[in-house]
């Protein structure tokens, strides 16, 4: 059965000030109804200030990153969308007509991008409203129904989240910063809109549920009616919304208290020139430019900070080696320490220095990883860390001495190995590593051991 | 010299202190306003505020244009600590937490807010009878309506209860009572005066302006409140306004437009008074030019559709959750009529049919007026097509709306318009209206000044 999925994604824009007033936007950090003024609480007589330019610029940047054509040189009205709910202090939400259209992200067409303002937060249980969030700018991204499965929708949302993160202009995905309305229809059924989805996972689960629900209905010969449903996070199901909530006519009118936006081409050009490369485009470029495999490139572009770091390091060392290290060791260390690449304190030079030492076998990969952890924890030049960690490379003579000593003092293990018990080799390697206090490269130790033990064997023959 | 200048002069020379001026006003209001009903609430802090102005004057500090003048404020403007009820039960417990920008400017210029003026409920009316606090009488023609919606302001000035009033004009709400009460009223160019703090009627039409006993007073108050602020979006780029300098320059060589359309729409008795005003301008050297305004009367219907849609939108915040009462539950008939009309015609299925068409007619009327004002400096004509009815007389909504035929076009076009008393018909005042270009206030005031002068 053919499935069609389209998404409307709302994302808070990370400005310091609200869209139409000068109140701060950090609504989660302050007591209820403290970041408020007559404008964002809709007091009688309050008029909006001019739209926050930073919010508009951020939306333009997002639109351009999604390959959209920004609508320039024309009036873009900011409309009033009327509905009655306690979180909406004026009884209408300000929402712009599209500022851009006709974009695409990895095969999914973007229909349009526009600007909105967030309402406040209503607590139906307590019957209280908090207007701290009221007026926080939002960007809404609307796709065409181009996704064919929940998996595709999930992949798209992840890619979109990455694009949004790349702009550095949206709020990190927490506390309801990203919300989506999910539209889904199965062949032979009506389009169903699911509201109240607050995460990528939520969208995926809501879609999974809807497909089962709709497919069962169609199988039973029932019709899937066109309706709006709400996603219940706790139960991972969707339920119909009251007709009153959905059959509303918003009675859109242009807001008479705000001049319509006119986005000049120069403004869009300026923003385009100053913005970061979109992650999906950067990924392609990294693969080509540095000759690295796609899985590594995918990991590297997963964070803008990580990709920036990679390119800074790849200038100075073998890019393929760097890619392997980024994909495996660096990502592992960062995850373990719960760090974003953007938050690291070490310089690309320090990391490049370490990778050079690995490349020239001055340190082993294992030692390198120890140094890497230290660099992330307390940045310093890798050479210094080597000393600090006691990882000064072993002299050849010291290694030979340690190996000879081990062979002499562990005759049983030597005998076992020669009798074909390969495990004994690991035991002996461990002993050498112990003697050298971990400074030896276990691979080299193993190699030498095999050679020495075999040659003795041959002599005896 | 005129009432406003005389008052300023005596305050300046120390003959009248700001405090005494406030006391005089309070005494007069006490004595006369029970019958007139032009004030809803008085500012209990007015004397203290006057004392502060007085001290600044005594120290020789520069106080501002309105030093010590007593100002009435229409009830749809926010004044900290006073109730901005819009003369409606909807907001009868709403105490303002902030000053409207115009009130801030009045205070900064040394003006003292004496109290809150009565008005038609939510400015929806042309007679001053729809207030939840009862109708206002016309001191210039007792027993008749004072006009509206700035009924309290017009009546207060006519009765000399205060020096100047802040009114608002969406379709004639300053000019209509100015005409009926025989005082001066000015609706400035749209976007000249900040509306921050003005409770909505029709946001694309609303403008705050002055009501005064004379043209000097009206110009002085407008100079005080005009000019751009960062505190609002929809404003014209005007830094400072100056009108008094050129007020006495006369009208010699000025081109003054008149239209046959005015005569078609207006009671001949009223028109007779207006003709004399036009004749006077000719005598003073103005060139009288005929202008064509073929679609002028179409503005009325368009206006009532636009204003209803915008009013519907603007009143959604009165949902009963924050200010006690849901507007539809407690408002008067005319307010409810406009909300219902706005709700009806803004429905998706009727968009192209009513609202969009109304906006097209608005454009038509605007273009017509703009074209006329290309040819002339000012258009002069009647303000209200008929004389005010007696208080309590029953009018149909259309009869009531018909008061607005001649004032609405200036709001639709966004141009400035001012009214000054031209004469009377059987003792009932008649105001002549001068409509100027966008930001043409200076020329408009010059014409008004000539029309005002005795002789």
Image (cartoon, rainbow, N blue to C red):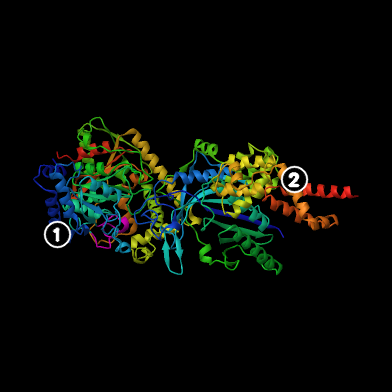
Magenta-tinted stretch: B118-135
Q: In this view, does B84 lie to the left or right of A219?
A: left
Front residue of this view, candidates B263 and A78: A78
Q: Residue placed at 43% from the left, 68% from the top?
A: A127
Front residue of this view, candidates A448 and A361: A448
* Magenta residue check for B268: no
Q: Is residue B352 visible?
A: no
Q: Residue placed at 81% from the left, 49% from the top?
A: A450
Near mark 1 (Cα within 10 A), the count class, few <14, some 14-19 or many ≥20, is few
Disc 2: host chain:
A
Front residue of this view, candidates A60 and A30: A30
Locate the N terminus of chain A by quadrant. bottom right
Near mark 2 (Cα within 10 A), the count class, few <14, some 14-19 or many ≥20, is some
Front residue of this view, candidates B15 and B130: B15
Marks 1 and 2: in contact by CB < 8 Å?
no
Which type of secondary structure does the marked residue at label 2 adopt?
helix
Q: Is residue A355 left or right of residue B140?
A: right
Which residue was labeled with disc 1?
B30
Disc 1: host chain:
B
Q: Position of residue A456 (x, y in %)?
A: 85, 49
Location of residue B59 (image quadrant):
top left
Q: Where is residue B385 in the image (x, y as percent from the top left)?
A: 28, 49
Which residue was labeled with disc 2?
A400
């Amino acid at each position: 059965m053919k499935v069609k999925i389209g998404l409307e994604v709302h994302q808070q824009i990370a400005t310091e000030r609200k869209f139409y007033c000068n109140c701060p936007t950090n609504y989660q950090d302050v007591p209820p109804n403290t970041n408020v003024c007559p404008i964002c609480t809709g007091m009688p007589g309050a008029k909006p200030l001019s739209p926050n330019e930073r919010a508009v610029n951020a939306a333009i940047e997002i639109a351009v990153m999604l390959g959209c054509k920004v609508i320039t040189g024309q009036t873009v009205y900011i409309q009033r969308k009327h509905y009655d709910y306690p979180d909406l202090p004026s009884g209408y939400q300000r929402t712009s007509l599209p500022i851009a259209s006709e974009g695409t992200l990895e095969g999914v067409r973007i229909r349009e991008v526009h600007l909105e303002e967030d309402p406040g937060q209503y607590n139906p249980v307590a019957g209280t409203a908090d207007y701290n969030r009221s007026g926080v700018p939002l960007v809404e991204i609307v796709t065409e129904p181009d996704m064919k499965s929940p998996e595709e929708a999930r992949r798209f949302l992840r890619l979109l989240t990455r694009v949004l993160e790349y702009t550095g202009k949206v709020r990190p995905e927490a506390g309801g910063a990203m919300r989506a309305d999910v539209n889904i229809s199965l062949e032979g059924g009506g389009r169903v809109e699911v509201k109240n989805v607050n995460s990528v996972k939520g969208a995926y689960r809501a879609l999974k549920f809807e497909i089962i629900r709709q497919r069962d209905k169609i199988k039973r010969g029932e019709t899937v009616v066109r309706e709006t449903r709400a996603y219940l996070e706790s139960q991972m199901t969707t339920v119909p919304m009251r007709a009153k909530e959905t059959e509303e006519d918003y009675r859109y009118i242009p807001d008479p208290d705000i001049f319509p936006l006119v986005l000049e081409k120069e403004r869009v050009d300026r923003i385009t020139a100053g913005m970061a490369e979109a992650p999906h485009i950067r990924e392609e470029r990294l693969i080509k430019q540095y000759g690295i495999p796609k899985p590594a490139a995918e990991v590297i572009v997963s964070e803008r900070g990580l990709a920036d770091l990679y390119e800074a390091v790849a200038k100075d060392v073998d890019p393929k080696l760097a890619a392997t290290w980024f994909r495996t060791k660096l990502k592992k260390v960062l995850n373990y320490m719960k760090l974003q690449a953007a938050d690291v304190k070490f310089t690309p030079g320090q990391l490049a220095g370490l990778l050079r030492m690995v490349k020239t076998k001055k340190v082993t990969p294992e030692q390198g990883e120890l140094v890497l952890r230290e660099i992330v924890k307390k940045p310093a030049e890798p050479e210094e860390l080597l000393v600090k960690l006691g990882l000064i490379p072993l002299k050849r003579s010291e290694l030979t001495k340690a190996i000879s000593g081990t062979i002499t003092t562990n005759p049983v293990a030597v005998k076992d190995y020669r009798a074909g018990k390969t495990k004994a080799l690991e035991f002996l390697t461990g002993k050498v590593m112990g003697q050298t206090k971990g400074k030896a490269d276990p691979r080299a130790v193993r190699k030498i051991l095999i050679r020495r033990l075999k040659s003795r064997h041959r002599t005896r023959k | 010299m005129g009432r406003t200048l005389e008052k300023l002069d005596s305050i300046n020379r120390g003959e009248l202190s700001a405090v005494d001026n406030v006391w005089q006003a309070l005494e007069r209001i006490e004595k006369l306003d029970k019958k007139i009903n032009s004030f809803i609430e008085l500012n209990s802090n007015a004397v203290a505020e006057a004392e502060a102005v007085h001290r600044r004057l005594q120290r020789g500090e520069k106080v501002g244009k309105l030093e010590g003048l007593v100002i009435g404020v229409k009830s749809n403007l926010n004044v900290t600590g006073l109730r901005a009820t819009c003369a409606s039960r909807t907001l009868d417990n709403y105490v303002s937490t902030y000053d409207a920008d115009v009130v801030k400017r009045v205070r900064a210029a040394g003006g003292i807010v004496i109290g809150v003026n009565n008005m038609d409920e939510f400015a929806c009316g042309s007679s001053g009878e729809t207030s939840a606090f009862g109708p206002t009488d016309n001191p210039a023609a007792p027993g008749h309506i004072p006009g509206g919606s700035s009924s309290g302001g017009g009546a207060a000035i006519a009765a000399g209860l205060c020096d100047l009033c802040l009114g608002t004009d969406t379709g004639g709400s300053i000019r209509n009572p100015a005409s009926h009460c025989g005082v001066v009223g000015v609706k400035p160019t749209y976007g000249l005066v900040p509306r921050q703090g003005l409770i909505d009627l029709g946001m694309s039409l609303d403008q705050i302006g002055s009501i005064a006993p004379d043209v000097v007073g009206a110009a002085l108050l407008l100079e005080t409140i005009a000019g751009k602020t960062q505190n609002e979006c929809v404003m014209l780029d005007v830094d400072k306004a100056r009108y008094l300098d050129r007020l006495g320059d006369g009208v010699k060589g000025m081109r003054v437009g008149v239209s046959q359309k005015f005569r078609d729409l207006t009671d001949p008795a009223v028109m007779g008074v207006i003709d004399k005003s036009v004749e006077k301008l000719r005598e003073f050297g103005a060139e009288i030019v005929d202008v064509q305004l073929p679609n002028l009367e179409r503005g009325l219907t368009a206006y009532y559709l636009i204003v209803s849609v915008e009013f519907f939108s603007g009143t959604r915040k009165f949902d009963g959750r924050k200010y006690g009462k849901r507007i539809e539950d407690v408002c008067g008939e005319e307010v409810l009529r406009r909300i219902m009309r706005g709700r009806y015609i803004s429905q998706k299925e009727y968009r192209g049919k009513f609202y969009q068409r109304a906006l097209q007619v608005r454009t038509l009327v605007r273009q017509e007026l703009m074209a006329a004002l290309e040819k002339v400096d000012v258009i002069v004509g009647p303000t209200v097509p008929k004389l005010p009815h007696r208080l309590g007389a029953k009018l149909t909504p259309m009869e009531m709306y018909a008061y607005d035929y001649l004032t609405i076009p200036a709001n639709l076009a966004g141009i400035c318009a001012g009214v000054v008393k031209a004469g009377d018909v059987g003792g009932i005042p008649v105001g002549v209206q001068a409509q100027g270009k966008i930001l043409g206030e200076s020329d408009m005031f010059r014409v008004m000044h000539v029309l005002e002068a005795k002789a």
